Image: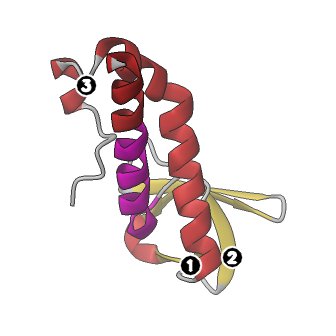
């Protein structure tokens, strides 16, 4: 019973975190840069991002130079990418170990 409750708790935590990701930049999001649509490919060096689109790959584009596409389909995709990320990489760990102290320092919490 306790294991089931833990799984339910972390499932709803992931829903919450994924819903917060809708307004933030996430890998896979569509953005507009210089009037053209691109997809965010790499954000390790945030605020500099890598963009791809139509066989073009751009690196080190500052986040102030592009704008996230803002429509219901884009919101759904942001939620979906974030949800898949948490379910694939964190859900199993959290269900087994809970949220450990070292995890709190990771940039996965969508803090505003």
Q: Nearer the viewer, mark 1 or mark 3?
A: 3
Q: What residue does disc 2 label? A: 37
Give the farthest residue toward the top.
Answer: 96
Q: Nearer the viewer, mark 2 or mark 1?
A: 1
Q: In the image, residue 82 lies at what x, y percent?
A: 50, 49
- Dominant SS in magenta: helix
Residue 77 numbered tag = none
Q: Quadrant of residue 39?
A: bottom right
Q: What residue does disc 3 label? A: 103
The residue at 36%/22% (across/down) is 94
Residue 69 numbered tag = 1
The first of marks 3 and 2 along the sequence is 2
User: Which SS class for mark 2?
Assistant: strand
Cα gap from disc 2 to disc 1, whole angstroms: 8 Å
12 relative to 94, above or below: below
Q: Quadrant of residue 32?
A: bottom right
Picture quarter with the N terminus: top left
User: Which SS class for mark 3?
Assistant: helix
Mark 2 Cα shell of 10 Å, populated few (<14), some (14-19), many (≥20): some
Q: In the shown orientation, is residue 55 left or right of residue 39?
A: right
Give the farthest residue toward the left.
Answer: 101
The residue at 38%/73% (across/down) is 64
The first of marks 1 and 3 along the sequence is 1
Q: Is residue 29 visible?
A: no
Q: In the image, residue 12 lies at what x, y percent?
A: 38, 45
Magenta highlight range: 11-25
Q: Is residue 54 visible?
A: yes
Q: Which color mode does the image show?
A: secondary structure
Q: Nearer the viewer, residue 93 or 78?
A: 93
Q: For the residues labelled 2 and 1, say whether their Cβ atoms are less than 8 Å apart.
A: yes
């Amino acid at each position: 019973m306790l294991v089931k409750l833990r799984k339910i708790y972390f499932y709803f935590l992931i829903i919450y975190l994924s819903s917060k990701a809708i307004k933030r930049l996430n890998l896979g999001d569509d953005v507009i840069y210089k009037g053209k649509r691109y997809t965010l490919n790499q954000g390790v060096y945030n605020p500099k991002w890598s963009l791809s689109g139509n066989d073009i790959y751009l690196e080190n584009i500052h986040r102030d130079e592009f704008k996230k596409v803002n429509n219901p389909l884009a919101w759904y995709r942001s939620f979906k990418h974030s949800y898949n990320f948490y379910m694939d990489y964190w859900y199993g760990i959290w269900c087994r170990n809970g949220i450990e102290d070292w995890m709190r320092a990771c940039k996965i919490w969508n803090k505003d």
